[in-house]
Amino acid sequence: MTKEPHLTRAPGGVALPAGPAVLRRANLSLVLRELRDHTSLSRADIAEATGLHRATVSNLMAELLERRLVREVGVEHVGAIGRPRRAVALHGAHVGALGMEINVDYIAVHGTDLSGRVLVERRVVYDTMGSGPDSAVRRLGLVAKEAVEAMRRVGAVPAGIAVAVPGLVDVTRGVVTLAPNLYWHDLPLADQLSSILGPLNVPVRVDNDANLAALAEYTSGIAAGTPDLVYLTGEVGVGGGIISGGKLLRGADGFSGEVGHLRVDPNGDQCGCGRIGCWETKVGLAALVRAAMPEQAYGLPGMPVPDPGERVADIARGLASGDRRMMMAVAQVGEWLGLGGSILANLFNPRAIVIGGYFASLAQWLLPHAQDQLQRLVVAAPAAQCRFVASTLGFGAASRGAASMVVNHIIDDPAAIMDPLPRPAAY
């Protein structure tokens, strides 16, 4: 199979042949992406899948082996008399990817190596909403340093950090434009966190929490591989990540997915964004806690900030025991969840609406009400075949997606991490 040369684009949009360095970087990325999607492959398998010449694959593989980004995992025999083939797999145990999420009441961490092996995972209870941006970023930096040190103890140096935030994010600049539930406005989070991390010299990226969680669901969640899905965060605020045709839908300015601020009740409560009757005022965790356990509502003076999982566990126990107030609160949230879901189904025609966070934890009680509303209100039902499904990734979906984003950046541009890595004398 003869491979067509890679092309780059001139400023005017004219296709030009790529230079040798650009072409090599693209081919290294092509090989790594192929290995990411398979447990192991032979060089011949990679050549056939990518269209690269076998000699080119062997040359690229030699470099990837030297850099310890791949490893040989055994010999495959093809056919009764076929020549044995040495299989290779993604390795990079020394290359780390740190994903983080900062939300209203916690900071989550998910650190992996290049092959996806989990190195560190934790959630820290923290009152981000009440702490102010400066204190919150300092705490985020402290948690990041602790996670980096934990990864280094097992031999992995983070090649990047990505932070998930519940709000509008200018991804290019790493600026949180607006996070209403955190009271953040035009916060240069990437620059501030980089400054705190200082000599660690790790690139920092920032993105919306729902977008990153949607990527995690699409790659490794309950609806993995579903090309059209919507993910709902199920936190104090409610965000949405939209996968359309297998691609994350960002919109013209990167601000798509703010589904929690759909106006569903003109006579409703004021939202943290300043508007009236937003969907998250009906279905966010704060709304459920206020209805199910008003004595523990968010924002009460003198109330400690518990782990969100603890709040949800308390509600689940009440539901299991038949607590009437909690049953009514969950039924009401479920109906509003179905109403908002029907709007998304009518707009995007997804095959699945994946619910995460507390929605997933209480799915057995929420989903009957939500699915009933969805079926009743979707214009194309039953032909649309859209269903609610509960995420299995828990409250860690966004931090997991953030780590995956770092891995994707490494794979897309492996040359960016190759020069600083130590070259072993022999491999």
Image (cartoon, helix red, strand yellow):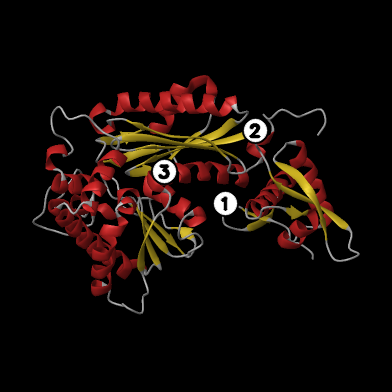
Q: Amino acid at mark 2?
A: His
> How far from the left and from the top, in percent, is residue 385?
37, 74
Residue 412 visible in this rendered orientation of the protein:
yes
Tell me whether the residue at label 3 lies in contact with that at label 1, contact meaning CB atoms closer than 8 angstroms. Answer: no
Q: From mark 2 to mark 1, how far is it between C-alphas?
A: 37 Å
Q: Nearer the viewer, residue 390 or 136?
A: 390
Q: Which residue is mark 2?
A: 94
Q: State left or right for residue 6 relative to residue 392.
A: right
Residue farthest toward the bottom in the current orientation of the protein? 383
Pick whichever of labels 3 and 2 is earlier in the sequence: 2
Residue farthest toward the right in the current orientation of the protein? 81
Q: Nearer the viewer, residue 270 or 305?
A: 305
Pick whichever of labels 2 and 1 is earlier in the sequence: 1
Q: Which residue is mark 1?
A: 11
Could you tell me which quadrant the C terminus lies in? top right
Q: Is residue 227 above or below residue 154?
A: below
Q: From mark 3 to mark 1, how far is it between C-alphas?
A: 41 Å
Tag 2 secondary structure = loop
Q: Residues within 10 Å of mark 2 (few under 14, many from 20)?
A: some
Residue farthest toward the left in the current orientation of the protein? 267
